[in-house]
Structure formats: structure tokens, C-alpha cells
Image: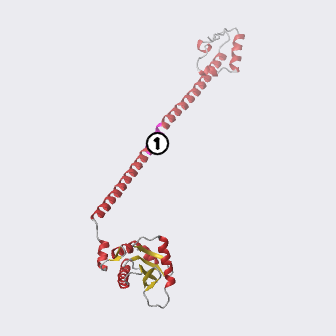
Amino acid sequence: MVVLAASIISKSGKALVSRQFVDMSRIRIEGLLAAFPKLVGTGKQHTYVETENVRYVYQPIEGLYLLLITNKQSNILEDLDTLRLLSKLVPEYSPSLDEEGVCKTAFELIFAFDEAICLGNKENVTVQQVKQYCEMESHEEKAHKLMMQSKINETRDVMKKKASELDKMKMERGKLDKGGYSAISGPRVVEKAFGDMSITGSGFGSGSGLGGLSMDMDSFASKPKGGRPSAAATAPGKGLGMKLGKTQKTNQFLESLKAEGEVILEDVQP
């Protein structure tokens, strides 16, 4: 007896799960499965259908077909026994016997089929043994899973550490930016304040110089014509006030002194 394939298909011949136990191309298995619904007649009680090359042994399960494809030389009784075993395994691994439920549990069903059939021959096992074999734990598998989980956890820890370092760097950079702004802006403000003070001081100087000049002019006007002006009055100041006080009125006053016979000493610039 040789089981070529064990499959679960829809009523229209759509393959949901198929496990081949011999070398078979995809085109051939798809063709065999697609041809099966056309061979099944309505109202027939048979559980197998034969063609020139293969035999279909099937069992309806709700809206689907559980199907074995065998060669014609296989023992039909053993095929039926294998079919009954698979029909008990399918509900164990696929509680929802519809297209969506079978597709979700496709790999679990394939593993169960592999435990029940080996190289096309039925294994002498029960449903409980198949479940035990499928659930059997492997020490190497558990060690591999633990190693992978430890790597995942280590990677997460590294990512968290890097993220915290980046956040800390951003905070320090923000503090440095704020400190640099105050350090730069502080001297500028002080320099500007001193500049304003110097400008204000020069203004006061010019004002005082002009005021002193006007007072000297009044003293010269109140003196008699024969008197000599004091040295403080005749000597022009070298400050900014005297420079700013050289107006047209001053020139007229000096001309009047010259007309009265006074000697005016003029500073000669070097």
C-alpha cells in the first residue's frame, strides 16, 4: 500500500492542506485534487473513486473533504483504516472545520499526518500517541529558544541604554545651549550699558563746556573796557566743550575784543 498524498479540500476542489509522501510535482497534485469533485457523484454512498492511475479514498467532514490519494494496488481496507485515523486527528488540531480554521492550523495538521503516515505507509499508532509525539519536548529546542530569548532581552536592554544615553546627551546639550546664550549675551549687555554711559557723559561734558563759555562771555561783558581778561577766560579749554562751543557768537565776541585793543592769543595747531 502506498499513500501518495493526504489532503483536505473544499467542495469545489480548492486545496487547503496537502501532504505528499512521494515525489510529486505541484502541477500533478493540483490537477488530481481539482479533478476529484467532478468524479464524486451526488447521493452515492461509496467512500472511494478510482481512475486509470490512482484511487481516491475520501470522507466528508462538514463542508470539506478529507482525501487520500493512493495507487490502485493498495489495500482498500488499510486505506480506510488510515482515513479513519486522520478523520480523528483533524478535529483535535482544527476545532473549526471550515476553510479559515483549517488554513490557520495547516502546519499542525501536516505534522500529525507525518506521524500517522511515513513514506506512504500507515504507522501503527493511535490518536493519543500522535498527540504525544507532536507535543514531545526537545532539550535542544528549549535551549535554542532560551538562547534566542536571552539575545532578544539583551538587545532590548542595549536599546534602552542607548535611548537613555541619547536623552541624557540631549538634556546636557540643552543646558549648555542655555548657558552659552547667557554668557554671550551678558557681556554684550554690559558693554552696551557702558557705551550708553560714555555717550551720556560726553553729552554732559559738552553741556558744561558750553555753559562755562557763556559764563565767561558774561564776565567779559560786565568788565570795563580797559581791563584785561583773566587767563582762564582767554585760554580756550582743550576739552570737548570748547571744541563744541566755537559758534558764530563766539567769533563775534572775539572780534569785538580786538576792536577795543585787546590782544587775543590764538592757539596754533602743531
Q: Is residue 160 left or right of residue 232?
A: left
Q: How many marks?
A: 1
Q: Is residue 25 above or below residue 223?
A: below
**What segment is highlighted magenta in the picture?**
174-183
Q: Within the image, what quadrant is residue 97 found in?
A: bottom left
The structure residue drawn at horizontal position 37% and vertical position 56%, both measured from the top left corner, is 156
Is 262 within the magenta?
no
User: As rendered, which of 7 and 218 lies closer to the eye?
Assistant: 7
**Residue 229 image position (x, y, % from top left):** 63, 12
Eyeballing the image, is 194 above or below 95? above
Percent position of residue 210, x then y: 62, 23
| Among the 4 quarters of the image, the one containing residue 152 | bottom left
> Does 146 sit above or below residue 98?
above
- Looking at the rendered image, the quarter that the C terminus falls into is top right
Apparent side of residue 205 relative to residue 126 in the rendered image (left or right): right
Q: Position of residue 157 (x, y in %)?
A: 35, 54
Residue 182 is one of the magenta-drawn residues? yes
Q: Is residue 138 visible?
A: yes
Residue sitting at x 46%, y 42%: 177
The one nearer the camera, 204 or 44, is 44
193 relative to 65, above or below: above
Mark 1 = which residue?
177
Three-letter amino acid code of the residue under disc 1 = Asp
Secondary structure under badge 1? Answer: helix
- Name the dominant secondary structure of the magenta segment: helix
